[in-house]
Image (cartoon, rainbow, N blue to C red):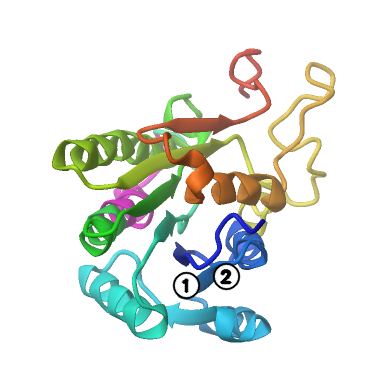
Amino acid sequence: MQRLADKTILITGGAGGLGSAAVALFIEQGARVVISDLNVDTGTALAARYGKKAAFVAHDVTSEAAWAQAMDFVAQQFGQLDVLINNAGILQSGDIETTTLAQWRQLMQVNADSCFLGCQHGILAMKAHGGSIVNVASVASWMPMQDFPAYGASKAAMASLTRSAALHCRKKGYAIRVNSLHPDGIYTPMLQATAPGIAPEHILFDPARNPKGRARMPDDIARLLVFLASDDAQAVSGCALQADNALLGMGLWP
């Protein structure tokens, strides 16, 4: 049985590593997908691969006007929106002494502001019929990272916003579930750029201390997105789903 049959899903950052893996699984599970990204060539080619099951929209997730246009595009292409995946994000290194205010603001804008705008527009689009919103955050939401303070702060904002939005929907009587997903690291080009040439079993881990640890692969996390988007998770809202193979509990955060 297809878990996402007849659902329309908008995924931001849909042309990237996790995004493209999620698109493939969403469509395999019966969904129609709108791929949102600023990478027009890659996004257009990805949508073309799936024919009438997918469409691409060029979308600046930091722009309020662009969010309104993206929602109009979804309605024109496939009708009502059922699931929103706030997946777009960036990663930059720099400790508290070296991170510039411009870098801080860019990370907050792309990661946190886009999540706020997505939740706001997603709720407006789905409050009459219900749906699911999933915000792709990180275990950095609550664990300190010396070299990524701005990134961690932006993901912490996403985690808090998720809980507030879930509570809002419950209080208002909207059948909208809002959850966040917190991987410890996904082996995508964005992560690989921070550690070029390093194998997935070594990124973020000390193999001597945690021999079974490795960075998540895109499909690992995409499967969790399928679950949170599906009716299988109908009782789950306001949840921060940690996907880290007990990394935090074992005290192995780098």
Residue 60 coordinates in the image, percent (x, y): 35, 72
Give the dominant element type of the magenta stretch: helix, strand or loop: helix
Q: Amino acid at mark 2?
A: Ala
Expressed as whole percent of the image width and height from the top left, the position of residue 7 reads: 47, 65
Q: In this rendering, is residue 139 above or below 231? A: above
Instruction: Tell me the quarter of the picture where residue 20 sits.
Output: bottom right
Residue lying at the far top in this picture: please name it: 250
Which residue shows up at 28% across the image and 79% down it? 72
Q: Amino acid at mark 1?
A: Asp
Say few, some or many: other residues with alpha carbon within 10 Å of mark 2 (under 14 / 14 to 19 / 20 or more): many
Q: Nearer the viewer, residue 104 or 52?
A: 52
For residue 46, say whether it is visible: yes
- The numbered mark at residue 193 is none
Residue 102 among those drawn in magenta: yes
Residue position for label 1 = 37
Q: Alpha carbon of mark 1 to alpha carbon of mark 2: how far?
A: 6 Å
Look at the image and tell me whether residue 117 can be seen.
Answer: no
How packed mark 1 is, by other alpha carbons closer than 10 Å (few <14, some 14-19, many 20 or more), is many
Residue at 29% x, 47% y is: 175
Q: Quadrant of the C terminus?
A: top right
Residue extent of the magenta highlight: 97-116
Local secondary structure at mark 1: strand
- Residue 23 position in % (x across, y down): 60, 66
Is residue 146 placed above or below 17 in the rendered structure?
Answer: above
Q: Is residue 66 left or right of residue 17?
A: left
Number of marks drawn: 2
Q: Which mark is residue 15?
A: 2
Q: Secondary structure at mark 2?
A: loop
